[in-house]
Amino acid sequence: MIAEPTAVNDELVDELLAEQFGRPPEDAARDAVVAGAQIDRYLEHLARIQKAFREQQEIAAARKADIDAWLAEQQAAADRSAKWLIGGIRSLEGALNYGKKRSYSLPKGTVGYRESKEGIEVTDATAALAFAVRVRIARMEPKVGKTELHAYFKAHRKVPDGCEVRPAADKFYVETTEGRITG
């Protein structure tokens, strides 16, 4: 059973991580050379973690692709079997005496007919959309574009309704030889 996170657990994890990666030297906060060396050491560990994450993602993607291929193969075989069985049922069902009913119940299921309603099937999406726009039955779902809102703000120096200005600010980041970590 996995313990729920608590302050005690977090402190224990912090202790274990400090032992694994090393504590900053006492004088690191006052000495740029010592601080730089410790930060570089931490960056080396972060790069290893990033590399491990990437390798794990690649392995997971390969496994997922294998599973997807297996599933498609299994479902294709089941689909072929189901279509064959339905074809067999359709060839035999004419011998059943439905009487006035539209279906026939058997111990393992029911066969029959249901009335389907007339409908429209789209065969050319581009032509259908052009038609719908022309006769004004197209659904248009407006979306707010942050790029356009920002361009409007820059051009007019007026904050659009429903918006607020986020001032420019320095954002701390960490970048290792394996890539950037946002945080």
Image: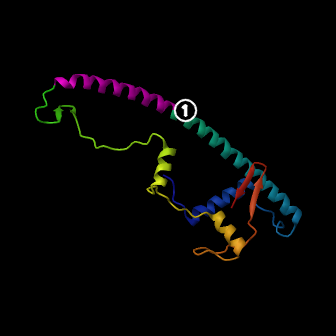
**Location of residue 138 in the rendering, given as x and y in whole percent from the top left corner:** 46, 55
- Residue 78 in the magenta stretch? The answer is yes
Give the image quarter of residue 81: top left
Residue nearest the viewer, comparing 181 with 133: 133
Residue nearest the viewer, comparing 12 with 182: 182
Here the colouring is: rainbow
Q: Disc 1 residue type? A: Asp
Q: Is residue 141 left or right of residue 91?
A: right
- Residue 172 in the magenta stretch? The answer is no
Tag 1: Cα neighbours inside 10 Å, few (<14), some, or many (≥20)?
few
Magenta region: 69-95
Point 30% across, 43% down: residue: 118
Residue nearest the viewer, comparing 70 with 141: 141
Q: Mark 1 — residue?
A: 66
* Vertical relation: 105 (above or below) 7: above
Point 62% across, 38% down: residue: 59
Q: Is residue 97 left or right of residue 13?
A: left
Give the image quarter of residue 136: bottom left
